[in-house]
Image (spheres, helix red, strand yellow):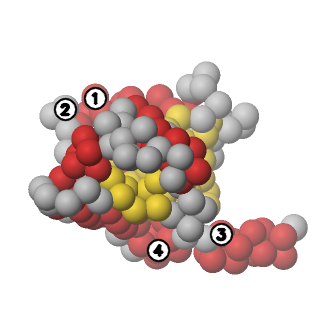
Amino acid sequence: LSRHIESQRELADRMTAGTAQFDADRNLSFFNRPFAVMAQLDPEWLGEKPEFDRVIERMRDNQRLPEVRDFPVWKSERRAWFTSPEEVIEEEWMLPGGDHIRVVAQPLPDGGLRLILEDRTEQLRLASARDTSLRVRSATFDNLFEAISVFASDGRLYLWNRRFRDVWELEEERLSEHPRVDELIPAMARKLVNPTA
């Protein structure tokens, strides 16, 4: 049993998600290194099996919880996770430093609670940067005098500007379906002097 527990701990330490488990008395019974890192808690202190409230309070001291107006009420709502009828509770925490943590809480049949923390900060930064890049590119394309369209390697329309839509008298809804070039040509042909060409 101890070898099994140790192998589980080694596996949990290799994961990127932080995991902590509390027993029915609400004392910490298990945690992995990523949890200690994400919560910015000393592993030795966690090894003393602190109570759930103490862990939450220490995370708050380290600014690893979202800022809330009424912390005692917020903490009480999280304590209710132990007895929640829901199988899984999910929350997104925006931390004061700008980090974004996805929290999954699972009440256990023995009255305990399993917490999983996933750092989503980099994913959200990349998504935001990508969205900004797409908006800038679209705005740049729309300000060009020329009609521009870009087709992907599979032949589907990938990008276009307003001038392209207007010159060929195409509907935005149709373009947003990203039609293949062979599907788009008949609609464009009606604007040519010789449509059969």
In the image, taking residue 188 as reference, residue 82 lies left or right, namely right
Q: CA distance from mark 2 to mark 4?
A: 28 Å
Q: Amino acid at mark 3?
A: Ala
In the image, taking residue 121 as reference, residue 66 lies left or right, namely left
Q: CA distance from mark 2 to mark 3?
A: 33 Å
Q: CA distance from mark 2 to mark 1?
A: 6 Å
Q: Which mark is residue 12?
A: 3
Other-residue count near label 1 (Cα within 10 Å), few / some / many at <14 / 14–19 / ≥20: few
Marks 3/1 in contact by CB < 8 Å: the verdict is no
Ranked by sequence position, the earlier of labels 2 and 4 is 4
**Which residue position holds label 1?**
73
**Which residue position holds label 2?**
70
**Which residue position holds label 4?**
43
The residue that appears at 68% across and 38% down in the rendered structure is 108
Q: Residue furthest right?
A: 1
Quadrant in the picture for residue 32: bottom right
The residue that appears at 61% across and 22% down in the rendered structure is 85
In the image, taking residue 177 as reference, residue 68 lies left or right, namely left
Q: Amino acid at mark 2?
A: Asp
Front tag of 3 and 4: 3
Label 1's element? helix
Other-residue count near label 2 (Cα within 10 Å), few / some / many at <14 / 14–19 / ≥20: few
